Image: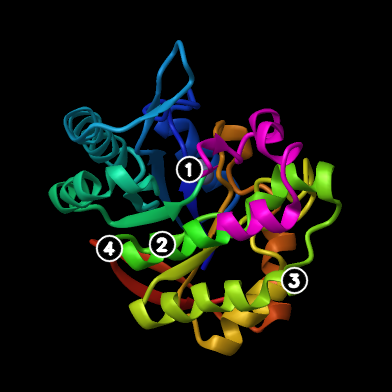
Amino acid sequence: MIIDYHLHNHFSCDSESETSDIAKKAIKLGIQEVCITNHVETFDPETGDGLFSYEEATSRFTKVKKEIEETQKNFPNLPIKFGVELEYVKPWMSDMKRFVDAMDFDFMIGSVHAVDGVIISSSELSSELYEKVTEQYSYSKYFENLYKMVEWGSFSAVGHFDICKKGGYKFYGPFNPQKYKNQITDVLELMKKKGIGIELNTRYMHKDCNEIFPHPDILKWCVEIGVEHYTIGSDAHTAEEVGQNFEEALTIAKEAGITSLSTYEKQRPTKHKI
Ligand SMILES: [Zn+2]
Ligand SMILES: [Zn+2]
């Protein structure tokens, strides 16, 4: 079963895609289920700072849910799930818990996009950090934040597990996960303990760092440690990007020993053989 479980539409601050265009593209590619996972945060138009408010997020995601229900009627053979991409910023997390409890999502991605207040998921912005500090400092800090997010734990799967390499490769060269193996496997052990899954994110397989998230070695460690649930997501911000690089990613997954992908209904996972 092929799914796309990381998709942004016009309710995300950085996308204008229509849900029906996403659904049409998915059907064309033979994808059997999708999940719309918009960013929880918005950005201040003047400062560019990330913002999260319980009131804004609940009101916006109530609209997302309604739109998905309406769109679903026109695509009876393609389940369209209601998801979110959360962001770990420590002071936000108690309101974030209230928010996820109130919304009753099918699936929630937990992502870290910032280190020391710098948005490292943006190639341009990340240079602000990477040109000043060593790889050891910035990547260790990133994986520390990831660990704290998993400790918080109110989500289904970790998004783009090693996104630090996206902008980092320009400053530090290719990412070698072996250097951070202890830190990374600590995160994976905690994910296994908490039943948190991991996504294969295909967005940057042929741009920027030219690699899948996470690195194939990390996928092998997931299998060794016994992480139970895997999803695949294109992280599409336009309908054209839906399902990008999936064939190649599934080959990497199988080579790492992954045998199933999971779909989610009200946060309950079901495994499907690949
Ligand atoms: Zn993200
Ligand atoms: Zn995303």
User: In the picture provided, is 222 more to the left or to the right than 67?
Assistant: right
Disc 4: CA contacts within 10 A as few (<14), some (14-19) or many (>=20): some
> Would you name the residue on which mark 1 appears?
7
> Would you name the residue on which mark 2 appears?
148
Span colored in magenta: 114-142
Seen from the viewer's position, the closer of residues 246 and 159 is 159
CA distance separating discs 4 and 2 = 26 Å
Residue 4 visible within the image:
yes
**In x, y percent, where is residue 35?**
40, 50
Q: Amino acid at mark 1?
A: Leu
Element class at badge 1: strand
Mark closer to the chain start, 3 or 2: 2
Element class at badge 2: helix
Instruction: Report the disc number at residue 265.
Output: 4
**In x, y percent, where is residue 77?**
38, 53
Instruction: Report the disc number at residue 179.
Output: 3
Element class at badge 3: helix
Distance from mark 1 CB to nearest ligand 2 atom below 8 Å: no
The mark lying in front, picked from 4 and 2, is 2
**In x, y percent, where is residue 221?**
63, 81
**In x, y percent, where is residue 97?**
21, 52
